[in-house]
Image: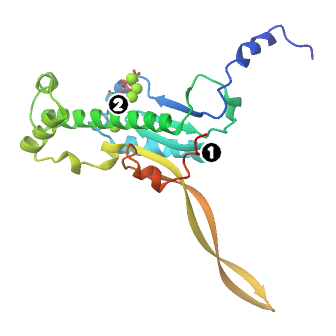
C-alpha cells in the first residue's frame, strides 16, 4: 500500500527519544481529584479504600511492566520509575529524565516531603473541623502561618493526637518495589516405581508495598537492587 500523505507526521515523533542511561519517571496525578473525592464522599483527610484501590491499580501496572523498578504513591498521585535501560515506547518523551541516582532519590524525596507537609496540614485541618467544631474557613484561618511544630502542638494538646503515631501509609505514602520471595510447593515425582512428594523451592519476584521513609539511606541500603550503580 502506498504511503499515506499523512505519514509525514511521524517525523515529529523521531526527535523526542529520551537520553540513554537515564531513569525515566512518569508521574500520574488525578485531574481535579478534589471534585471526584467530594462526589464519592471520600473520608477526610485520608480515604483508605481509595488509597487501597490506587495501590492495587499501581501494583497491576507494575506487574505488567517489568521495567518499573519502584513506584511511589501518595494522595492522588503515583510516580513510576523505569529502569535506565528501559526501551518501553522506544523511550519516547513527555516525561522527566533523572540521570543520576542522587537526582532520582531527590525526586522521590521531594514527593515524600510533599506527602508529609500535606498530610500534617490535612490531619490538623480535619481534626479542627470534625472534632473541634470549626468551620472550614475558621480552620483555614487558624492554621494560617503556622509551622510544623505548631500543627503538632495543636494535634497533641487539643486532640490528644501524636502525629508520629498516625498511620505510616498516610505520613509516608506507598513505595512499590520488586522483592525476591522463596516459594515452596510440593511436587509429585516417581522415584524407582514409587510416587513421592518432594518440596520444590524456587525464587520468584513479587511486588511488595512499603510505607517507610525513602528520604534517608536505610531504605536504599536495604534494597540495593532498585538502583543501578552510577557511571
Ligand atoms: P489538579 O491535580 O490540579 O487537577 O487538581 P486536584 O484537585 O487533583 O488537586 P491536587 O492533585 O493538587 O491534590 C489532590 C486532591 O485530592 C486534594 O484536594 C485532596 C484530594 N485527596 C487526595 N486523597 C484524598 C483522600 O484520601 N480523601 C479525600 N477526601 N481527599 C483526597
Ligand atoms: Mg495539582
Ligand atoms: Mg490532582
Ligand atoms: Mg490521601
Ligand atoms: Mg495531587
Q: Residue 180 is drawn in which quadrant?
A: bottom right
x then y, percent, for residue 46: 30, 39
Regarding mark 1 in the picture, which secondary structure is present there? helix
Residue 28 drawn at (x, y percent): 49, 30
Secondary structure beneath label 2: helix
Q: Going 49% across and 34% down the picture, which residue do you hit?
A: 103
Q: Residue under circle 2? A: 37
Q: Nearer the viewer, residue 185 or 43?
A: 185
Q: Residue at x 11, y 26 (%)?
A: 142
Q: Position of residue 54 (x, y in %)?
A: 45, 40
* Contact, mark 1 vs mark 2 (Cβ under 8 Å): no
Q: Please tell me whether mark 1 or mark 2 is closer to you in this view.
A: 1
Circle 2 Cα neighbour tier, 10 Å, few/some/many (<14 / 14–19 / ≥20): some
Residue identifier under label 1: 64
Report the Cα–Cα distance between label 1 and label 2: 27 Å
Instruction: Give the left or right position of residue 135, taking residue 53 as reference.
Output: left
Mark 1 or mark 2: name the one nearer the start of the chain.
Answer: 2
Label 2, ligand 1: CB separation under 8 Å: yes
Amino acid at each position: 500500500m502506498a504511503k499515506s500523505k499523512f505519514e509525514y507526521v511521524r517525523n515529529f515523533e523521531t526527535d523526542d527519544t529520551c537520553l540513554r542511561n537515564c531513569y525515566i519517571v512518569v508521574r500520574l496525578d488525578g485531574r481535579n481529584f478534589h471534585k471526584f473525592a467530594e462526589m464519592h464522599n471520600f473520608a477526610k483527610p485520608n480515604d483508605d479504600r481509595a488509597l487501597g484501590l490506587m495501590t492495587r491499580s499501581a501494583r497491576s501496572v507494575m506487574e505488567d511492566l517489568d521495567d518499573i523498578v519502584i513506584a511511589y504513591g501518595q494522595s492522588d498521585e503515583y510516580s513510576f520509575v523505569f529502569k535506565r535501560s528501559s526501551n518501553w515506547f522506544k523511550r519516547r518523551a513527555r516525561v522527566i529524565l533523572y540521570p543520576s541516582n542522587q537526582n532520582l532519590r531527590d525526586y522521590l524525596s521531594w514527593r515524600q516531603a510533599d506527602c508529609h507537609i500535606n498530610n500534617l496540614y490535612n490531619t490538623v485541618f480535619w481534626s479542627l473541623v470534625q472534632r473541634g467544631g470549626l468551620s472550614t474557613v475558621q480552620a483555614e484561618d487558624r492554621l494560617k502561618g503556622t509551622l510544623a511544630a505548631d500543627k503538632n502542638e495543636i494535634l497533641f494538646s487539643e486532640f490528644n493526637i501524636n502525629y508520629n503515631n498516625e498511620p505510616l501509609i498516610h505520613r509516608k505514602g506507598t513505595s512499590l518495589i520488586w522483592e525476591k520471595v522463596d516459594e515452596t510447593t510440593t511436587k509429585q515425582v516417581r522415584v524407582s516405581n514409587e510416587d513421592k512428594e518432594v518440596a520444590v523451592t524456587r525464587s520468584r519476584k513479587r511486588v511488595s508495598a512499603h510505607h517507610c521513609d525513602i528520604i534517608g539511606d536505610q531504605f536504599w541500603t536495604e534494597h540495593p537492587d532498585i538502583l543501578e550503580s552510577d557511571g
